[in-house]
Amino acid sequence: MVVRIFPLLFLACSAFAQAPKVIKLQELQALMNKKSDNIQVINFWATWCGPCIKEMPLFEKLTAENRVDVKVTLVSMDLDLDPNPEKVYKFVARKNLKSEVVLLDEKNPDSWINKVDKEWQGSLPATIVINQKTGQRKFVGKELHEGDLERLIEEVQK
Amino acid sequence: MLVDMKLIKNTFLFACLVLITAAAGKLNYGVGDTVSDFKLKNVDGKIVSLANYKTSKGVIVIFDCNTCPYSRAYNERIIALNKKYAPLGYPVITINANDPEQSDGDSFEEMVSLAKRKNYDFPYLVDETQEVAKSFGATNTPHVFVLKNENNAFKVAYIGAIDDSPRDASNASKKYVENAVDALLANKAVTSTKTKAIGCGIKWKD
């Protein structure tokens, strides 16, 4: 009996843990350019990127605040180097990430990095904070520290 | 008369400002800019500077490191670039600017060991103060600057990635650095002078 139930249980559990979606540039642009009353916080990271992992609790803290006006998306760039998304799935499960995670699947970064932000040189981590009402945005091409996100959110609301 | 004095004073101040800016050297080189010479320590303990390359047609400067997965993915391609282009007059110089305090595997000892293990036949320099990386405007690893030697003035001809396929060298459809150097060797204009790629940010000191 136990043997029979176990696979069922496993299936049920894995159905609850939502795997991060693999997206294309078009979907990322749609998310960035959406018109809404929200502040969109988009962070580019990868599982191999030390400073990205270090700053991740800042985004998780923001998500945990459950603010109706702020939406956090963590965009994994892992697929740029490794076509297997498994490492990201495992990382998200292990860290029990609550922020929305997506994997960007695009080739030839030179053709699309400027479309995300002209200031971005392509280095990780990188963060963009967008006021989707006014279109105001801030880009930061380095690791964030305590208080930085709150400051950026304030700045795009001025 | 008073107005004239003011104008003269302002013009003088402006001239001073221009001179000071020029003397300080330009930061964040763009394509066409002349690079200031640098002196950095190589893994063999010797000091290397651009002045050592007066007889070459140019150099391929690559900001690189030990630890970044992109650096590892491109390591063999960097070694191959030197094998191919050093004999043609465009040798490779690699520079590691990562702060070893923030990046364990990027100490000078680790650099020496990587260069040995991989049989580097080109310099692997340590940019301890990070000033060279800052003056170039390097941000990622690996980040390439192809310099052309014009009467001992090294001018930036290309800035960016090695190719468009970090995952797999054999899938690269655009080999940016090779295309740039091939064009320079043929006395032709470089078509793609600036490209971007995903990469590890240089680990700056706090």
Image (spheres, coloured by chain):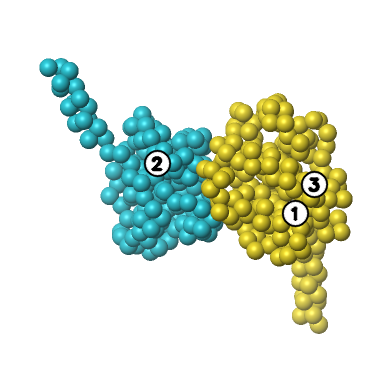
Chain colours: A cyan, B yellow
Name the subunit of mark 1: B
Query: Please, which residue is most extreme toward the front here?
Result: B170
SS assignment at label 2: helix
Which is nearer the eye, A66 or B29? B29
Residue at 17 percent of width and 18 percent of height = A3
Q: Position of residue A43 (x, y in %)?
A: 43, 46
Quadrant of res A76 = top left
Q: Mark 3 or mark 1, which is nearer to you?
A: 3
CB atoms of marks 3 and 2 within 8 Å: no
Amino acid type assigned to the residue bearing label 2 in the image: Phe
Q: Position of residue B152 (x, y in %)?
A: 86, 55
Query: Nearer the N terminus, badge 3 or badge 1?
Result: 3
* Residue with the mark numbered 1: B147
Name the subunit of mark 3: B
Crowding at label 2, few (<14), some or many (≥20) Cα neighbours within 10 Å?
Answer: many
* Residue with the mark numbered 3: B87
Distance of label 3 from label 2 (alpha carbons): 50 Å
Crowding at label 1, few (<14), some or many (≥20) Cα neighbours within 10 Å?
Answer: many
* Residue with the mark numbered 2: A59
The C terminus of chain B: image quadrant: top right
Residue at 26 percent of width and 35 percent of height = A17
- Mark 3 vs mark 1: tell me if same chain: yes
Q: Mark 3 or mark 2, which is nearer to you?
A: 3
Side of B55 where A153 appears, left or right: left
Amino acid type assigned to the residue bearing label 1 in the image: Leu
Residue A13, numbered label: none
Distance of label 3 from label 1 (alpha carbons): 16 Å
Residue at 68 percent of width and 42 percent of height = B80
Position of residue A3 relative to residue B91, above or below, is above
